[in-house]
Structures are given as structure tokens and as C-alpha cells.
Image (cartoon, rainbow, N blue to C red):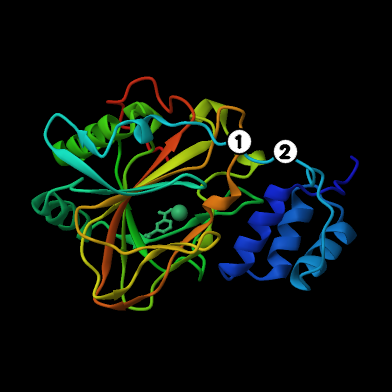
Amino acid sequence: MEKITRISNELKDWILQTLKSGVNPESIVAAMVKKGFDQDFAYLTMLRILNNQSLKTVDGNQSPYMYESIEIAKRGNIITTTDREVKVLLKMDKPCIIYLDNVLSIEECDQLIHLSTNRLQPSEIIDPITGEKKAVPGRTSKGAYYHLNETNLIATIERRIEEITSHPLNHGEGLQVLNYNIGEEYKAHFDYFPANQIDMDKGGQRIATFLIYLNDVGAGGETIFPKVGLSIVPKKGTAVYFHYGNSHGQVDRMSLHSSIPVITGEKWVATKWIRQTTICQNSQMNEVLT
Ligand code: PD2
Ligand code: ZN
């Protein structure tokens, strides 16, 4: 079979991210070769990336990401849900980022932390080349995954996210709660999948992230969008929504983001990743979605 000797912008981004997250270059080259890339091409590509040299990508002249209007941005400064008023604190258009206050009550935050404490496992990333899940030094937090509607509390939070964002509940992956201790971080990454890992049977591409802050952090732990110099400081009960996938199947590379190391105290967040389409027909279905 003919070996692959071309690389896309997306794959280049993912290689950069994977390197940053601590995976060694040899493992990435080995994974590329396993996936059908020409060995010399894979080594040369890696060398160029490591030496910060220009790299010709197949989609080098891909048209720029087209920003589309999204539902949540049309809702005004106060978003009224069935059970609360959510206030918009900050809006950015490119990339699309919205910071929201009063998403969860103090009690709901405490209950979700309590529920997750004994369920935490070391966080993993999805290897951009092999698609396998694995722990890497660049993501040092611990996490707990929930099925859709797994408990009353989870169902309440999921319904609220649906009301705020207008994305149907069953377009969302199961909620993931993350806990970072001092020094722990999640290095710069994109939440969307590389093109070769989009599974249309499982909701397709990720298009948006809803990230809820479950506690105040003494120092550090901000969510950073380095391409636009934006830093979101965690505040208990607030949430940041960012949107990076459009109806043309493009993804927004401006949405690169990270969680910087916690300096004082600890950090708790709950993440909901939203897909293009239905992940499962029945939102009551207790299926593992990540
Ligand atoms: O915990 C965060 O601030 C954070 C930052 C970047 C979480 C995620 N990404 C994520 O869960 O994707
Ligand atoms: Zn992320």
C-alpha cells in the first residue's frame, strides 16, 4: 500500500500539542508510521516541527474559518432558564467565547465536588494519531466521567446547559469533572478532534465546550486562550462557553486553550463537550460517551 507523504494543518497542530503535552517525538513518529505514513516523511516532518521550520501542509491555503452566529450569543445579557437567571459577563467574537455568571448555585457546585471525590482517575488525552486514550505529563489533573442523566444533580445541570446553549442534551458528551492540585495543569490543546478521528456514528465533530468552575482558586488555575491573550479566572458557579466548529465542518484554530498550573489551593471544573449531532438517540441511555 502506498505510504502517506502529506500532512494536514490539523495533524500539524495535533503533533505540536502532543509534543507540548510531553509525548516524546519518537513515539509520535512511530505512531505515524503505524498509521501508514512514510517513515522518512514522518521523521522529516518531526524534525521540521521541532526546529520550528516551515512545513507544507495539504490544506496550507484552506479558507479561513467562517464565524457563524450562534444561539447563545443572541440571548441578551441575562439568560433566563427554568430555574435561574444566568448573567453574561464577557463576550468575544473571534474566537467565540462567552463567560457566564450564576450557572450553578454554591450548593450544586459543592454537591458535584462531593459526588466526584471518590471517583477521580488520572485524566487522559486521546492520542491524535492512534486515537487511543492515554495519560500524558501535559494533563496532570484527575477526572470523573458521568453518563448522561446519571443522577438527579447531573440531569439538572445537563438540562440547564441545554437551555443556556440551545444545544440538545443528546448532542453533549457525558459530563466530566476535573480536579487539579497545586502544580497541575492541562497544557495548550484544542477540544475538537483531528479529521481522521471524527466518528459520525458518535455525534461527529466536537463543536463547543461548556466549562463550569466549581470553586474559587487562590492563585493560578486560569483557563487561558493564548492566541487572543485571554485569561478566565475561575469563580465558583460561573462557566465559560467556547464555540469552535461551524456548519461547513471547519474548526477554529483560534480556540487553542489551556489550564495553567494551580499555585494556591485546588481547582475543580466540570466540562461538557458538545458534538455536531446526536450522540445517542435516547438521552436516558446509560452509555459511556467519551
Ligand atoms: O480546566 C480548565 O480550565 C480546562 C482548560 C482547557 C479544561 C479543558 N480545557 C477541557 O476540559 O477541555
Ligand atoms: Zn480543553
Secondary structure state at the residue bearing disc 2: loop
- Where, quadrant-wise, is the N terminus in this rendering? top right
Residue 224, quarter of the rendered image = bottom left
Residue 156, quarter of the rendered image = top left
Name above or below for residue 54 compared with residue 206: below
Ligand 1 shows up in which quadrant of the image? bottom left
Q: Amino acid at mark 2?
A: Ser
- Picture disc at residue 66: 1
- Say whether residue 90 is left or right of residue 8: left
Tell me the distance, in whole angstroms, between the alpha carbons under discs 2 and 1.
8 Å
Name above or below for residue 175 compared with residue 284: below
Q: Closer to the camera, 17 or 250? A: 250
Residue that protrudes farthest toward the left in the picture? 107
Residue that protrudes farthest toward the front in the picture? 76
Residue 44 in the image, given as x and y percentages of width and height = 86, 64
Q: Residue at x 57, y 32 (%)?
A: 199
Q: Residue at x 53, y 31 (%)?
A: 204
- Where, quadrant-wise, is the C terminus in this rendering? top left
- Picture disc at residue 63: 2
